[in-house]
Amino acid sequence: MISNLFYKKYFDYYRIKSNVSERSLQRLLKYTAENIDYYRYLENDTLSISKFPVVNKEIYRKTGLDSFVTKENKNKGIVRRTSGSTGSPTKIYIDKFTLASQLFHRNKFFNLHDLSLGMSEARFWSRGKSIFYGTNNIKNILLNRKLINDLDFFGSESQCYKNLYTLFNVIYFYGYPSLILKAANFFENEKSRPCPKKIITTAEVLTSHDKNHIENVFNCPVIQEYGCSEVDIIAFQCKCNSYHLNPRLYIELEEVSGSGHEIIVTDLDNYYMPIIRYKMGDIVKLNDTQCSCGIPGRTISSICGRTSDRFIVLRDGSEIHVSAISSIINASNKYDSKISKFRIDHINLDLIDIKIEGNFNHENKLYLNKELISKLNHLLNDKITITITFSEIDNSIKHNYFKKLF
């Protein structure tokens, strides 16, 4: 199978080049202080992780990625783009070794549930041209993926069934729980249903009620993955439902009074663009005892602060995944617009207000207002009024880019 050969290439590359247990935090810190401009002020002979500053997307955006990448690596490597869920998408650079390490550990987590990369997959992902055209479409074919997005749920019942028929020919589902939940709702009353062996959800927190509903409809376990584009998997559920931390990362847990612990991540593999003490704003709750599955180390019981409600609901009953709007806003962030954050406020069935924060002049505002309203009206078929507001956006621990106000 082509997909198995694709993954084997990277697994072999990872095994030959290094063993993750030999990766040293001190080695990474020393390399970073000597080679990365942002950290050159640190003294090599007294390095410790606590001496390194905490960073986040905002710091990457304001400082510029050139300060975090060596001159030799600039404009090279593999580019990972964040989803832009905070309103400020970020580019991260990795090399083949880091990608191989990510895939290697992803496969190990999948193996806990008798899955492996390369098995036929239905990927539930948001709408966006980048996943339909060019190299990404070829990549989906090579990796044995069948793509399902919010467009597949539009139209008549027979049309939706035709769009979703590919689900009958895959081994597992992977992707946004909000989209997988739509599939569960669609097949709930159908006599013939897909029979995946497992379902893996990511990017959004899944409520226990919705998790049970999906499991009952498709008659298989739902496993939850926690991660981000910057470092891939941070933690993954075992069969006992505990989230086990990824051993390729150095993870700090900072207590937040009354809420749990905030996660701070260091990627031990990425020397291409060292990601050290990266704070995403995610709050987690820890288990007090060792997991009964036998895998050592501390585990997470739950991820707090995210929502699975990601759909814009229009008056005629049609829905669209909010990431489709996010993609249009991110694509419009060009020239000198400098959008730093945005929030989509779904005021009522007839109105969406998009708040945008950034460094704008009058021409920027005119351009963005015209560009966004034109594209969004086309996306939503002029079924709802769109307004653009330029203002500062209140931040919380995790900035949520979608608010439904009714």
Image (cartoon, grey):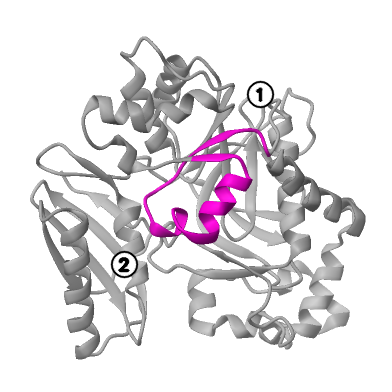
Relative to residue 270, is residue 376 drawn left or right?
A: left
Mark nearer the N terminus (1 vs 2):
1
Q: In which image quadrant can residue 177 be found? A: top left
Query: Residue 4: percent from the left, percent from the top?
Result: 73, 41
Residue type at mark 1 is: Lys
The C terminus, quarter of image: top left
Count of labels in the image: 2
30 above or below 405? below
Frontmost residue, 343 versus 124:
124
Residue 174 among magenta residues: no
Q: In which image quadrant can residue 5 be found? A: top right
Tell me what residue is drawn at x 36 percent, y 55 percent.
400
Tell me what residue is drawn at x 75 percent, y 67 percent.
49
Q: Is residue 390 visible?
A: yes
94 above or below 114? below
268 above or below 171? below
Query: Residue 161: percent from the left, percent from the top?
Result: 33, 26
Residue type at mark 2 is: Ile
Question: Disc 2 marks which residue?
Answer: 329
Extreme-top residue of the structure: 191
Q: CA distance from mark 1 to mark 2?
A: 39 Å
Residue 129 among magenta residues: yes
Tell me what residue is drawn at x 82 percent, y 63 percent.
25
393 above or below 240? below
Relative to residue 114, is residue 402 drawn left or right?
A: left
Question: Disc 1 marks which residue?
Answer: 239
The N terminus, quarter of image: top right
Nearer to us of marks 1 and 2 is: 2
Tell me what residue is drawn at x 79 percent, y 70 percent.
48
Q: What is the span of residues highlighted in magenta in the rendered image?
A: 118-146
Relative to residue 313, is residue 153 drawn left or right?
A: right
Query: Residue 392: percent from the left, percent from the top?
Result: 27, 73
